[in-house]
Image: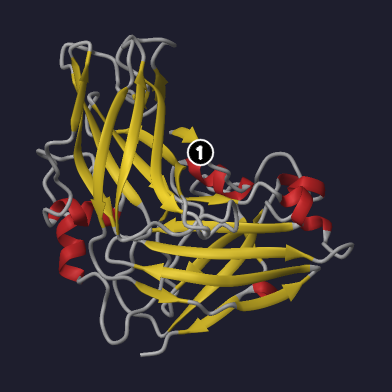
Amino acid sequence: MKKMKMALTSAMAVSLLMGTVSYAATGAVSGQSVIPTATASAAAKTPATAKGSFLTAGDLGLQIAETKGLAAVSGLSDTQSGMTVSVSQLLYDGTRLAVTLNRNATEMLTHFAGSYKDSKGNIAVEPEGAKGVIKKLEWFINQQTPDGRTESYPLDSVYTAGADNQSVLVRVTDYSNSGLNGQVPLPEKFTIKLKLTVAGIEEPFNISIPVTKIGNSIVLKPAATKTFDGVGVTFNKAELTPFTTRVAISAQGLPGKVSKRFGTGAAALSAIGYDVFDDQGKALKFIGGQGSPELSTSNKSNQDLLFEPFITTPKFITVKPYLNVFKDGKQTGEYLLDSKGMPVREYIKELEIKVPVKK
């Protein structure tokens, strides 16, 4: 995975590197499911032929979008030095923007993303400077400032290998839930500008992409807080769409009272991870997220987390903060792993937050 300015907590980073993350979040819509079970099942059973990058991403929300024919776009491309880069898939549901970029250069054997899984399932990386490989991705959007001016804001993104060596899947997010930069949420309709630098191509590719939100969204704002061992955890917000569950959680350390189990100095609070369950104890898969990098000055951690959509409507949701367990009872070093090779988690029951869902 390539990274663009994204700040992850240590718990999130470990899970991402392990490859199978079990962060989860669920929410509710009065009296109905956000995603019909039949649709989710159809996405999971799509034949392994003619798959686009959304279907191969291991992301239920993107799979649903491609299966239902909601992701395909055309007519968005730029050509430099005989190479064309185009946008073939796009999804924006108000919580995140996902884009598939394609390189029209079938004669090139390099992987557009620069990294990929080899035949043994190991991560392989193209040699530095290999022609046709992405060097830099930049995204910009114009937004109104409080005083009425229009400014161009950069947006962070991460990208991974797509369905083949000619494609990449890009996930773009904003900082509106992280407490940083004063950035406002992305509007329902906007144009985002892509500037893409590719190795071996002298000029960058520039593509303007019109974006419109699809699907309804449900917003929960419980603002519920639990405090224990000098740390207060607040479940601030959840946004539920047919394609994504987005959860905003913050942790505030009380000066001089934060237990050493949560870390010290700039690392304080960053070790806390979060699982979110529905009323049946079902957890959804973690997609990605970002966290506040200003822990050393504010003693506060803001987490803006993305998860796959839920299928059924729970009566309540529960946020369960946890710490990964280290070997030999230490506070640092190697993580203790379970039988599946995942870090063992110690849930902090005193900080769990249960939020009822009104129907």
- Image quadrant holding the C terminus, namely bottom left
Residue farthest to the bottom?
A: 359
Which element carries disc 1, helix, strand or loop? helix
Q: Is residue 338 visible?
A: no
Which residue is located at x 18 percent, y 56 percent?
43
Classify 246 as above or below 17.
below
Which residue is located at x 17 percent, y 50 percent?
66
Classify 114 as above or below 255.
above
184 vs 39, nearest the viewer: 184
Residue farthest to the front?
A: 148
Label 1 crowd (10 A; few <14 / some 14-19 / many >=20): few
Find residue 201 and report its image quarter.
top left
- Image quadrant holding the N terminus, namely top left
Residue 144 in percent (x, y) is at: 44, 55
Which residue is located at x 67 percent, y 68 percent?
348
Q: Is residue 354 visible?
A: yes
Residue 46 in percent (x, y) is at: 13, 50
Which residue is located at x 18 percent, y 12 percent?
82
Residue 35 in percent (x, y) is at: 24, 69
> Which residue is denoted by mark 1 in the rendering?
17
Residue 186 in percent (x, y) is at: 39, 56
Q: Which amino acid does label 1 sit on?
A: Leu
Find residue 299 and report its image quarter.
bottom right
Residue 201 vs residue 287: left or right? left
Residue 51 vs residue 354: left or right? left
